[in-house]
Image (cartoon, rainbow, N blue to C red):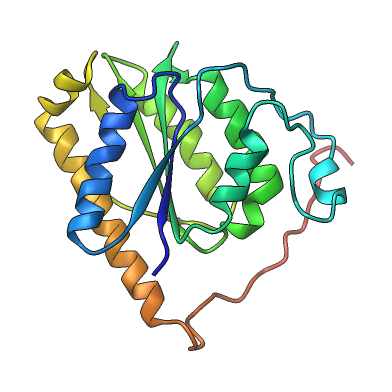
Amino acid sequence: MQKVMMLNGSPHERGCTYTALTIVAEELERQGVESEIIWLGNGPVRSCTGCGGCRRSGNDRCVFGDDGVAEIAERLKGGAGYVFGAPVHYASPNGAAVAALDRIFCSAGRYMQFKPAACVVSARRAGTTASYDVLNKYIGINNMIAVPSTYWNMVHGNTPEEVMRDGEGVSVMRAVGSNMAWLLKLLDSAKGTPLERPVLIPKEKTNFIR
């Protein structure tokens, strides 16, 4: 079984978002699943320009190579499952995380299809559900399997110590890890059988204006 790859989209390497991801990682480890947390960093991140260069390159690699996102996308391609984490900034995921995920899914999305994924958000107080909705749209558009939990995947706190005192948030993160491990084992047992992948229905693109 391969690793679960986790993206820490926070500008703080070991802040609240990282703390939430470590709780997921600890539960995965308890159930025999490896994981790795990749930090996006705290520098500027280019947004996706929709240039299509990644598709024309022949290697599905983003043409922008000056902010580390292309390298992160390459590392994510080999994951068995995914957790995308971001803090709440102004009632939505922080801009760098959104910009990075736009480019990651544009260039490497096909490598993540039919794999389990979860999104987690951290906030001092509010904006969590709106941010959670934004992040889940990446999973929903990419034929991925959304990992369930016992509540929406969020933690509250202004510091890692406060996050650890959010008892419900901690239990939700543990449930994400447990359910991720379960799904990965189910998918592993289906390898080599007709259940390994669903029948892929081609996307038909239409416009509202004719």
In percent of width and height, residue 149 lies at 25, 48
- Tell which of 203 and 143 is nearer to you: 143
Is residue 199 visible from the viewing direction of this image? yes
Q: What quarter of the picture does the N terminus occupy? A: bottom left
- Tell which of 139 and 30 is nearer to you: 30
In percent of width and height, residue 87 lies at 39, 22
Picture quadrant where residue 164 is located: top left
Picture quadrant where residue 85 is located: top left
- Above or below, 110 against 21 in this view is below
Most extreme residue toward the bottom is: 193
Indicate left or right for 47 with 163 as reference: right
Picture quadrant where residue 124 is located: top left
Is residue 153 visible from the viewing direction of this image? no
- Tell which of 139 and 36 is nearer to you: 36
In percent of width and height, residue 209 lies at 85, 37
Indicate left or right for 190 with 19 as reference: right
Q: What's the residue at 41%, 58% (across, down)?
A: 3
Q: What's the residue at 61%, 44% (across, down)?
A: 73
Q: What's the residue at 31%, 15% (across, down)?
A: 126
Indicate left or right for 165 with 68 as reference: left
Q: How many marks?
A: 0
Q: What's the residue at 56%, 57% (across, down)?
A: 112
Q: What quarter of the picture does the C terminus occupy? A: top right
